[in-house]
Amino acid sequence: MSTPLYQLKAEFFKTLGHPARIRVLELLSEREHAVSEMLPEVGIEPAHLSQQLAVLRRANLVRTRKEGLNVYYSLASPQVAELLRVARTILSGVLADQVELLADLQATQKQVRPPS
């Protein structure tokens, strides 16, 4: 019996569910990076970055190539970058709605306050 698509999608999104992994994918959306280049950008310990990269490799979201002593990472598919762009668009809309709601609440609160 095969795994239902919704379960596979849930596993896929769990893989994306870590800030360091998202940051790595954002960096790789720009260009290929060596591990040493990603360390200061991701801001985690080298061992932890290696663990996160391993998760992304197992999920087939990134590819590696070795050149001398350096290991370079790139996105396995350009659709990963597109997914991150779509997520940014969705979040921008959600946050804009929240800012608007906050402004409405603050305006209502000022109207309800009795004068001092």
Image (cartoon, rainbow, N blue to C red):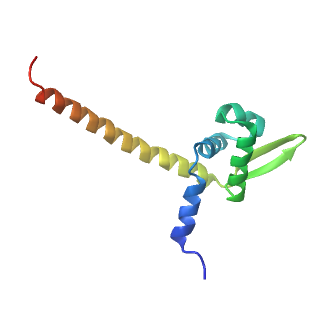
Q: Residue at x 75, y 38 (%)?
A: 46
Left or right: 96 with respect to 104? Answer: right
Q: Residue at x 75, y 41 (%)?
A: 47
Q: Position of residue 52 (x, y in %)?
A: 68, 47
Q: Residue furthest left?
A: 115
Q: Position of residue 73 (x, y in %)?
A: 74, 46
Count of labels in the image? 0
Q: Position of residue 95 (x, y in %)?
A: 38, 40
Can residue 32 be spotted in the picture? no
Can residue 23 be spotted in the picture? yes
Foreground residue, 54 or 31? 54
Q: Residue 40: which quarter of the image?
A: top right
Q: Residue at x 54, y 48 (%)?
A: 84
Q: Residue 14: which quarter of the image?
A: bottom right
Q: Residue furthest right?
A: 68
Q: Quadrant of the C terminus?
A: top left
Q: Residue at x 37, y 44 (%)?
A: 94
Foreground residue, 96 or 21? 21
